[in-house]
Amino acid sequence: MTPIAESPADRLVLEAVRVAFAALPASARVAVAFSGGVDSSVLLDAAVRVAGSSRCIAFHVHHGLSPNADAWLAHCEAFAREREVEFVVRYVDVSRDAGVSVEAAARDARYRALDALCAAHRIGWLWLAQHADDQAETVLLQLLRGAGLAGLAAMAPEFSPAGAAAARVRPLLHLLRAQIERYASARELRWIDDESNADTRYARNALRHQVTPALAVHFPGFRDALARTASHAASAQRLLDELARIDLDAVSRDDGSALSHDALIALDDDRALNLMRYWMRSQGFIAASSARLGDALRQLREVGEGGDGHRLRVDHAGHALRSYRGLVYWEAGDSSDPADETSLAAREISELVWQGQATWRLPQWRGTFVFEAVDALAVNAANATNAINAALNDTIPMSLLQQAPLRARSRNGGERMRTSDAPGARSRTLKNLFQERGIPAWKRDVPLLFLGDELLFVPLLGVNHAASHADVAPDEARVRIVWREDLLIA
């Protein structure tokens, strides 16, 4: 590659980019999150100068929040084209829900879009253009919010989010905004000025325009001091995470998806809360407030040993913390889910005349019955060898489903079924069967499927073998019934 002609204003930026490229495999491509502002414009320009356009791709996220968004897109595309860099845009919708700041919603949407673009283009490194001034502002914001160590650690130079396709790298994090702007001026770059950056209703903008200029006068080295604070906090957080990993190894059950209730509450409060924070991050949850976590631990201690806390419920990010049969775990759900079997809500009966439909949607239960056609001979062979669990292989003759209307009804209590067609098998109450299989009480609020007035199928338990199967040929076409709950995503 032809040596780069460097000016004194260039040198710091170019050296930072060289160091970042040196840490990657020789042929690796990087994606630059390219908004068109001065910071990302400098990062993209310097990356092309150091490694060439073939090793760079520019990702632009179009939020649609500004009337100038289309003009920004055109500018960014032209900027990338001038440098022969591949340019990709992703359009996103930003949540305007009450109680959610537009700034936070836009940031979340942007990172989701950038992660998706990295996955689609098989990019392993996403470069972000944050710098030392951004880091100082982040530390100040976290301090003012009363954040813990994880918050004070602010932005890491490199970070690999759980489940993300690419590591997030910040090559310019140690440089000042003024140093980046000097590079832009020396290179005569053109960039976008987002009008929202001047709106001091946003907390970060208020700090940038009203607080940090005063700090710079009285504490000229405040950026370096806050960067050290972030570094110290990150180091301390790593130690806390290591302790949490040790505790998680001792306390976790079911490959980390659940915790032992008794082992958790045996820890002191600080250690238990540290473990819960780490566990939630490992499950991909957003951070919970200290008040929310403290309330969860208090309820877990009130349940006592054994952990059968049917009424325990702590809602967070579309999930609910539960304790059952000695295990603590998160269940997808919303606040309408019953916390206890005794509080099951009666729902209106739904009816279907089955004529071969593949699905039957039941919104009141937030789920769907699925009717899957099954090869009768294959089922008979599987049952003969007992190779597959009978609860999963129970099937129903198609003709039986057409003998009477299907009805989906709520549990009333006292219903019975026979889960086996073996000689001598007896019918038992649904409550006993649920308990025997370890199904938590709050998951027992399921629609019972009746054929006319006869119980035919119960989600999580299977087919009622006491239902009449008279006059059914063994090789008749059959159906397997599956109950699928809606997926509630945090």
Image: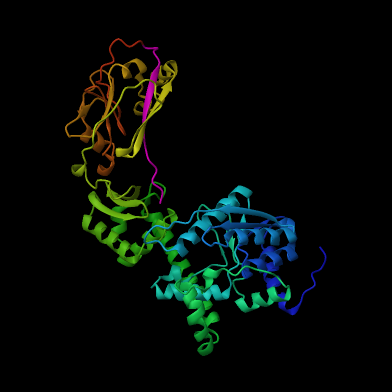
**Quadrant of the image occupied by residue 384:** top left
Q: Residue furthest front?
A: 67
Q: In the image shown, does 75 or 442 lie closer to the viewer? A: 75
Q: Position of residue 381 (x, y in %)?
A: 42, 17
Question: From the viewer's perspective, is residue 330 above or below residue 66?
Answer: above
Question: From the viewer's perspective, is residue 58 above or below residue 407?
Answer: below
Q: In the image shown, does 385 or 130 lie closer to the viewer? A: 130
User: Tell me, what colour scheme is on the image?
Assistant: rainbow
Q: Position of residue 39 (x, y in %)?
A: 62, 69
Q: Which residues are magenta?
A: 474-490
Answer with left or right where residue 209 lies relative to residue 269. Answer: right
**Quadrant of the image occupied by residue 182:** bottom right
Question: Which residue is located at x 35 percent, y 10 percent?
Answer: 473
* Residue 485 appears anywhere in the view: yes
Q: Residue furthest right?
A: 2
Tell me the quarter of the image containing the N terminus: bottom right
Question: From the viewer's perspective, is residue 480 above or below residue 250?
Answer: above
Answer with left or right where residue 326 lies relative to residue 189. Answer: left
Q: Is residue 478 magenta?
A: yes
Q: Position of residue 454 (x, y in %)?
A: 23, 22
Answer with left or right where residue 235 lies relative to residue 449. Answer: right
**Quadrant of the image occupied by residue 79:** bottom right
Q: Is residue 176 magenta?
A: no
Q: Position of residue 7 (x, y in %)?
A: 76, 77
